[in-house]
Amino acid sequence: MAKEGNIFKRVFMFYVEGFRNISSWGRQVWLIILIKLFIMFFILKIFFFPDLLKKNFDTDAQRGEYVLDQITK
């Protein structure tokens, strides 16, 4: 088991060193990727995917019944 923990540490350190030594072009690309992920998962969810279950049902039991009914149809 000691070798497995060692391999995970080595893989982790491999990525840490890679990100430390990344070029400025690579940093800009990662910044663009992170901004796009933020927009996709947080901004779009807030505006385009409202919580319909919470809006249409009062209790968790009602929500659960509705979901179960929709899945089993």
Image: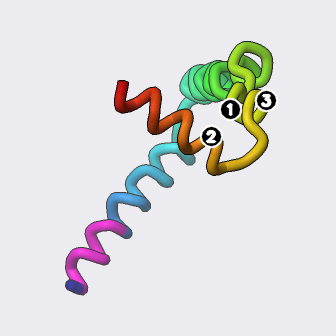
- As drawn, 34 above or below 64: above
**Secondary element type, mark 2:** helix
> How far across and how far down the image is residue 35, in percent?
69, 23
Q: Which of the marked residues, 2 or 3, is nearer the chain's N terminus? A: 3
Q: Which mark is residue 55?
A: 3
Going by the numbered disc 3, the residue's amino acid type is: Lys
Question: Based on the displayed image, in which of its 4 quarters is residue 11 positioned?
Answer: bottom left
- The magenta stretch is 2-8
Q: Nearer the viewer, residue 20 or 37?
A: 37
> How far across and how far down the image is residue 58, in percent?
78, 41
Assess whether mark 1 and mark 3 are in contact (beta carbons under 8 angstroms): yes
Going by the numbered disc 2, the residue's amino acid type is: Arg
Assess whether mark 1 and mark 2 are in contact (beta carbons under 8 angstroms): yes
Q: How many marks?
A: 3
Image-based side of 20 in relation to 36, left or right: left
The residue drawn where x is 72% and y is 14% is 48
CA distance for labels 2 and 3: 10 Å
Is the residue marked by circle 3 packed among few (<14), some (14-19), or many (20+) residues within 10 Å? few
